């Protein structure tokens, strides 16, 4: 077996920590749980990443960088039309579907998880929100409350990613259910375009 390099060890620990923080939250996850999930001992985890707080900050930084890259690419392709706005919404939905751990991390924070680490929203969320509101606002004008429409996308998408919808079978259907995802996507299109005063038919 090849020796584990510092980079490979750190990524292995970050992957395990991301899964556990997304599932249990920061407060519900111990360093021992992370070490066991990574197949390492606590001393090795500390060597590669520091303490739990350091590890959480690294997980959130990595999540932010992924989200920022996806959002910047989507905004670069934005066209000032109903179809363009719908496509932007789709890019965000697709990102969350591909990385369900990221909505989960933020939803734990909505419930006061890691309350002693209080500046992540200002550091990470606000710049991305400002970028979206600025770009979409320039496309639709001053009549719509673009900020609240953007927050509605986040609330709805994160909620659907974690909670899904209850169907007749008594099960929660989430983003891994193609039919449920298609219905959610269509509904969010209508909601966003109506909130921005745009004709949903123009996005078809």
Image: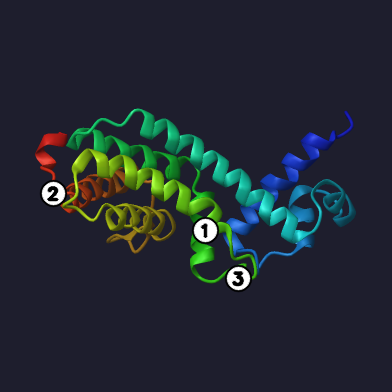
Q: Secondary structure at mark 2?
A: loop
Identity of the residue drawn at 43% across and 38% down: 71
Which of the numbered marks, if any, corresponds to residue 70? none
Q: Which residue is under mark 3?
A: 115
In percent of width and height, residue 121 lies at 52, 58
| Marks 1,2: beta carbons within 8 A | no
In percent of width and height, residue 22 lies at 58, 56
Front-most of residues 80 and 8: 80
Q: Which residue is under mark 1?
A: 121
In the rendered structure, the answer to whether residue 17 lies left or right of residue 9 reads: left
Q: Quadrant of residue 53?
A: bottom right
Identity of the residue drawn at 74% across and 47% down: 13
Q: Quadrant of residue 85?
A: top left
User: Which mark is nearer the camera, 3 or 1?
Assistant: 1
Identity of the residue drawn at 20% across and 52% down: 191
For the image, the number of numbered tags is: 3
Which of the numbered marks, if any, corresponds to residue 197? 2
Front-most of residues 182 and 131: 131
Front-most of residues 117 and 159: 117
Q: Split into 4 quadrants, where in the image is the C terminus?
A: top left
Label 3, label 1: how far apart the Cα atoms are: 11 Å
* N-terminal label among 3 and 1: 3
* N-terminal label among 1 and 2: 1
Graded by Cα atoms within 10 Å as few (under 14), some (14 to 19) or many (20 or more), the crowding at tag 1 reads few
């Amino acid at each position: 077996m090849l020796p584990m390099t510092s980079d490979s060890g750190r990524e292995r620990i970050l992957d395990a920590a991301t899964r556990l923080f997304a599932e249990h939250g920061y407060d519900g996850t111990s360093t021992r749980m992370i070490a066991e999930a990574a197949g390492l001992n606590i001393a090795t985890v500390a060597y590669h990443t520091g303490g739990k707080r350091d590890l959480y900050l690294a997980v959130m930084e990595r999540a932010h960088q992924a989200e920022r890259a996806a959002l910047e690419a989507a905004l670069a392709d934005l066209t000032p039309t109903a179809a363009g706005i719908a496509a932007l919404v789709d890019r965000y939905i697709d990102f969350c579907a591909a990385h369900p751990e990221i909505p989960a991390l933020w939803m734990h924070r909505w419930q006061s998880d890691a309350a002693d680490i209080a500046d992540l929203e200002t550091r990470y969320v606000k710049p991305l929100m400002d970028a979206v509101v600025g770009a979409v606002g320039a496309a639709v004008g001053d009549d719509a409350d673009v900020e609240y429409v953007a927050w509605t996308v986040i609330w709805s998408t994160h909620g659907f990613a974690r909670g899904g919808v209850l169907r007749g079978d008594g099960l929660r259907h989430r983003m891994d259910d193609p039919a449920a995802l298609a219905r959610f996507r269509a509904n969010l299109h209508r909601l966003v375009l109506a909130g921005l005063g745009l004709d949903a038919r123009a996005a078809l």
